[in-house]
Amino acid sequence: MACLPGESSPVVPMALTKRLQTLSLSARRLNDGSDELNKLIAQIDEVLHRLRISMDFIHPRPLQEHTTTSAHHKRTIELSYLAYLRVDDGHHLVIKTVKIMEDKAAVANESPGSVTPLLHAPRHLRHAAVDVLPELVDALSSQIGDLVSQMERRCETARELLDELNALEASLSGTRPVPEGLEGGGEDSGVRSR
């Protein structure tokens, strides 16, 4: 049914109103869910921080890859990774962004990148990061397990060496080494008899 200018159709505003209400409810649910997710991310980050895990880890798979081409046909690839890195007051969950710039000779230059605390990253990156958080925690746990095994092995090596040195010292105590050439005894031997 067509409307002439100045005429209104009661069906169109109702359909539009219903769509706007649906959109409003969806936006509210998205924002509420995002707020809850932010609180959970903050709590996870705080627990990791309290555990004092002072080791860096960058998840090997990028959360996002964005490629642009300049007017001079040079590509720039921007990769965003979930990472656990040192920032200001300790290690935290972050988004590490690296830019790779290519020229026509296909020589790539990688910039050191930027680090953004996860809670300050764009929403889509925060949400994507949650999907790989379990893998990051597993990797940190595995690295710590490896370090603990190495430390225990090194402690055992140090204990064994100390035991050997103590045994050597005990076997040598009570006898003084005699300087070469003075083995015959006498006054010059350094041994006094009473």
Image (cartoon, rainbow, N blue to C red):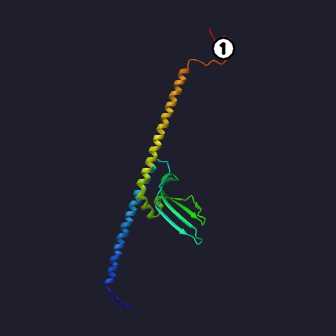
Quadrant location of the N terminus?
A: bottom left
Residue 20 in picture, x, y percent from top left: 36, 76
Residue at the far top in the pictured view: 194
- 167 with respect to 104 (left or right): left
In the rendered image, the quadrant that contains the C terminus is top right
Could you say where residue 95 lies in the image, as x and y percent from the top left? 49, 59
Vertical comparison of 25 with 159: above or below: below
Q: Amino acid at mark 1?
A: Ser
Q: Say which residue appears at 50% left-offset and 37% top-offset.
A: 154
Residue at the extreme front of the image, as rendered: 105
Position in image of residue 124 (x %, y %): 44, 64
| Circle 1 residue | 189
Q: Is residue 78 visible?
A: yes
Quadrant of the rendered structure where residue 17 is? bottom left
The residue depicted at 52 percent of the width and 26 percent of the height is 166
Q: Is residue 82 above or below residue 192?
A: below
Q: Is residue 21 above or below residue 56?
A: below
- The residue lying at 55 percent from left, 23 percent from top is 169
